[in-house]
Amino acid sequence: MIKRKTRAAILGLLLGCSLPVWSAVQPADSLYLLPQPKSVEMRTGVFRLNEVKKVSIQAPDSIAALIADYLPEGMKATTKSSKAPRMEIRLKPEQNGNQTDESYELDITDRKISIEAASVAGVFYALQTLGQLTDEEQKTVPAVRITDKPRFAYRGIMLDVSRHFFDADFLKRQIDVLAAFKINRLHLHLTDAAGWRLQIDRYPRLTELAAWRPQHLWKEWWKGARRYVMEGAPNAYGGYYTKEEIRDLVDYARKRQITIIPEIEMPSHSEEVLTAYPELSCTHELYKPSDFCVGNEKTFEFLEQVLTEVMELFPSEYIHIGGDEAPKTDWRTCPRCQKRIKDEGLKDEKGLQSYLVHRIEKFLNAHGRKLLGWDEILEGGLAPNATVMSWRGTEGGIEAVKSGHQAIMTPGQYCYLDGYQDAPHTQPEAIGGYLPLSKVYGYDPVPQELTPQEQQLIIGVQGNLWAEYVPTEEHAEYMLYPRALAIAETGWTQPENKSWKRFHHKAVQVTKDLREAGYQAFPLEREFGNRPGAGEVLKHKAWNKPVTYNARYWGTYPAGGDKALTDGLRGGWNYNDGFWQGFVSQKRLDVTIDLGSLTDIQRIQADFMQICGPEVYLPAHVIISVSEDGKEFTQLKEIKHKPVRNDEVTFKTYGWEGTAKARFIRYQALAGDEFGGVVFTDEIVVE
Ligand code: ACM
C-alpha cells in the first residue's frame, strides 16, 4: 500500500486494518514517538521482531483474548507460561484490569520485549508505541525502556457531522489515526440546524426530513431559505447513521480504546427538530425557531425518548447535551415558558435554560450517565454533577472547577480546528481565525490561576472541527491533520516533556506518511507561516513615540494599549493575536503621533484587515496629515475605498509617500457606513 508498509503494518496489524505508521530513527529524542512518552531511556542494541512467534500474555482469560486481537500479524498469543518468552505482556494483577489507568511500561532489550500495564488500554498504548518504534522494514525495534502515562484522562476530537455529513467509513478511518496517537474520545456533533444525523425510531421524521437539505454546501443553504427536503428527493444532500452503523462504529472505536460521545443539542441549535416536529417549539412555526419550548412537557418527552435511544446505542458515560448559544427570544413571549418560570420560581430565561439542564441531568444520572455541555450550561446555575466543556475562552472551565465541577478545555482560540491553519491566501476558505499548528501545540489546558486541587478537575482537552466551511471528507482530513496531533500530544504528554521543535519535526513526517496512506493531511513541510514580520519589532521614525487617541480603541482588543501603534510590533494573520488594536465604538481610528521634533519623512503607512464573518472591515476613508505645531495640520493624503462583503481574508496597506517635514502626524481611518464593524491596525509606520 505505501512505502512504509511495514510500519503501517504494526499499527494496522494491531488493529487488523491498514494504518499508516511512522519511521523510527535512533537517538532518544528523534525516536519516532508521538505523543512523547513520560520517560524514554535508550539502551544499546536492537530487538529482532521476526524472532517473536509467540507472545506470552499473563492476564485473566477474557482480557487475554482482547489483547490477543491487538497483536501484530504473525504473532500468536499464548497464556501458557514459558521459561524465556521473547515477548511478554503482563496485566498487573494487583490492578485488576483497572480500566481508567492507561499507563504502561514497555521494556525492550536485544533479547526480549516486555509490556506491563494495568488495563487493556495500557497494553493497547504500549503496542502503539511499539509500532512507532519499528523500523521501516518492520524487522527491528531499538532497545529502549519507556514508562508512560497520559497527563489527562480525556483526550478528545470533536467532529461536526451536522453541517456536512461524513459517513461511518470516514469516521472509522479517523478513529484509526486518532487511536494511533492515543486520542481516547471522539465527540460527534450529531444534531444541529443543518441536519439531524442519527436514526431515532420513535421520531422518524428526524431522519426522513431533518437529515436532508437541497444544498450540499452549508454556506449556500445558510444564505438561502434553510429548507429541508424528504429523504430520497432528487436534490437531497445529507444523511444519517443507522442504528446498525452506530453499533458497529461504537464497537470499532471501543476496540481502539476510543469512546464515542454523542451530542444531542438542546435547548437550541434545533431548527431541524422543530421543523420536523413543530409542536415542540414555542411558536410552532416551520424553519424558524431554534429553541425548544421549555414550558411544554412534550419537549421533555421528546428529549427523554431520544436520549433513551441514544443511551441504548452509546455506552459512553458522558452524554453531551450541547446547551450553547440559545437566543431564548421566543421564551420571553411564550405563555408556557413564562408559566414555567413562574411556577418553578425561576429568575428569568437563563433560569429556564438551567431548569432544562437540571432536569435532563437528573434523567441521565438516573440512567447511570453524566451530563456534559458547552459552557453556557453554567448560565442560571450549573446542574450538580455536570461537566463543562469550555469553548468561549477558558473562563467557563475556570468557573466550573472553582465550583467543584469537572471541565474539559476546548477554547476557540486554540482548539477550533476550523480556522485557517496557514496564511489565509494560501488556504481554502475557513471560518475566520488563524490557528496554526504551533498555536494549538502551545496551549496548556490547565489555567495558571487554579489551585492544585482545582487543577485536578481539568480532566482534559479537545480539538473541535466545526464543518460549516468543511464540505467534504477530504477537506475534513486536511483541517484535522496535523492539528489533531498537537491536541494528542497536549492531552498525553507532561508539559515539561513537550518540545515544539521535536514535535514539529515528527508532525512533518507524520503528515507525509498520512498522505502516503491516502489521507489528505495538510502538507506541513510547505507551511507558509505567519504574516511576515508578525511579532517582530520594526524600528521606524515613530517607534516608541507617544500617541494621542482622538478616538478610543476598543478595550476588548487593546493590543499593547496606548503604545500599541508605535511599539514596532506587527500583527499576524488574525486580529486576536494581541498585536492588532481594534476601533469600534466611534467607528474610527484617529490618532496623533508626536515625533518629538521636526523630522524629515518620506512614508506614513498602516495595515488593515478584512474578515467579514466577525464584521472586521477595511476602512472606507483614510486621511493622513502632518503638522509642525500640533495645531495646524496639512493633509498629505486622502484615500477612499468602498468596502465590499466577501469571503476572503484581506490585508491592505493605506499610506502616503513623498517628502515632508513635520513633528506631528495624524492618522484617521474611518469605518464605512454600509459595512462598518471593527477597524483593526497593528502599527503606524513612519519612515
Ligand atoms: C460552539 O462553538 N457553539 C460550541
Image (tube, helix red, strand yellow):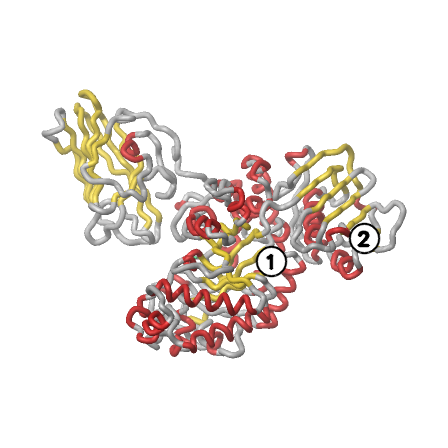
Q: Which residue lies most toward the right here?
A: 83
Locate residue 173, reporting x and y percent.
Answer: 60, 58
| Residue located farthest toward the left when viewing the structure as drawn | 632
Quick one: 204 or 164, which is closer to the camera? 204
Q: Nearer the viewer, residue 391 or 659?
A: 391
Front residue of 55 and 131: 55
Dot 2, how many residues are within 10 Å of its Cα: few (below 14), some (14-19), or many (20+)? some
Q: Amino acid at mark 1?
A: Arg
Q: CA distance from mark 2 to mark 1?
A: 31 Å
Residue 223 appears in view: no
Instruction: Find residue 214 and report its horizontal and vertical position in percent.
Output: 41, 71
Q: Is residue 405 above or below residue 113?
A: below
**Location of mark 2 (residue):** 58
Residue at 46%, 68% in the rendered image: 359
SS of the residue at dot 1? Answer: helix
Q: Quadrant of residue 270?
A: bottom left
Quarter of the picture containing the C terminus is top left
The 10 Å Cα crowd at callout 1, few under 14, some 14 to 19, many 20 or more, is: some
Q: Let me know if residue 291 appears in the view.
A: yes
**N-term-proximal mark, 2 vs 1:** 2
- Helix or strand or loop: what does disc 2 sit on? strand
User: Residue at point 55% right, 73% down?
Assistant: 309
The three-letter code of the residue at mark 2 reads Gln
Q: Which residue is mark 1?
A: 173
Tell me if label 2 and label 1 are in contact, CB under 8 Å: no
Q: Quadrant of residue 209?
A: bottom left
| Left or right, residue 325 beside residue 37 | left
Residue 375 image point, x, y percent: 43, 56
Q: Left or right: where does residue 574 sit relative to residue 127? A: left
